[in-house]
Image: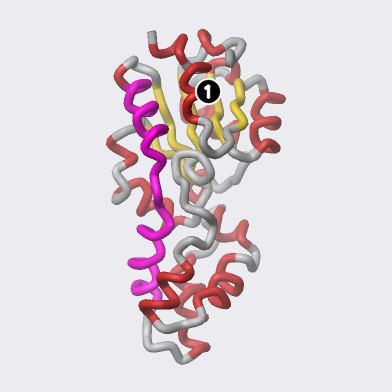
Amino acid sequence: MTLEGVQDIRAVVWALDGVLNRAKPGAWVPRVARELGIDAAAMERAVFRHDPAALLEGREDVLDRLQDWLDAQGADADAEDVLELWLPADHDPDPELSRLVQALAEAGVVQALWVQADSRRARWIAQESGWAEQVDAVLTSSAIGAVMPAALAPIEALLALPPHQILLIDSHPARVEAAEKRGWLGWDYTPGGARPLALALMPLLV
């Protein structure tokens, strides 16, 4: 499978969730429930589904929301306990795509990781997950103050590149379509699609 215009690409922007990270949304809930003895599913609904944009855009701290919920439930746990279990349980890197990231790095291609997450998770991804050592930049919605597609223009500014020189690899078709409308190249990634993606990126690897 080919990707027209890929030879002009100077930066690849990888979406973390749904692409490089295989963990399903809420994958951490059973572990938190088991180890802390709380109704983690109810906590997830109350904390993360109420005005999610305030978290994703960095206007509210998820730690405060978690602690407020725990206090209201009289739980014998604090928000830091939840974070210590949640963050690693919510992270499952795809080994095939990790190898592709490494190959692109060895070929000298600029790569950025797009993390659409609250500030606590974004910081963990940037500092603890190991991705910062594999890509040139970790870009987060909570730091930029915008989610996709509003984040496209700020990303262009941070990369100092015109749209036609940037490729977005994302599992959300609407985000890919929005990027393409701005002039980016886009790749609508589906689970297990590492091989066709690698073939499409071959002009950048040789």
Near mark 1 (Cα within 10 A), the count class, few <14, some 14-19 or many ≥20, is few
Q: Residue sitting at 51 percent across and 24 percent down?
A: 197
Furthest residue toward bottom: 74
Q: Residue sitting at 59 percent across and 60 percent down?
A: 54
Residue 9 vs residue 46: left or right? left
Viewport quadrant of the C terminus: top left
Query: Does the magenta stretch mainly form a helix, a strand or a loop?
Result: helix
Residue 120 location (% of width, % of height): 41, 59
Residue 135 vs residue 23: left or right? left
Residue 56 vs residue 64: left or right? right
Residue 70 location (% of width, % of height): 47, 83
Residue 107 location (% of width, % of height): 34, 15
Q: Name the residue under label 1.
A: 196
On screen, 92 above or below 180? below
Q: Residue sitting at 45 percent across and 13 percent down?
A: 202
Task: Using the image as rendered, state which of residue 40 and residue 147 is in the foreground.
Answer: 40
- Please state the extent of the stretch shown in magenta in the rendering: 79-105
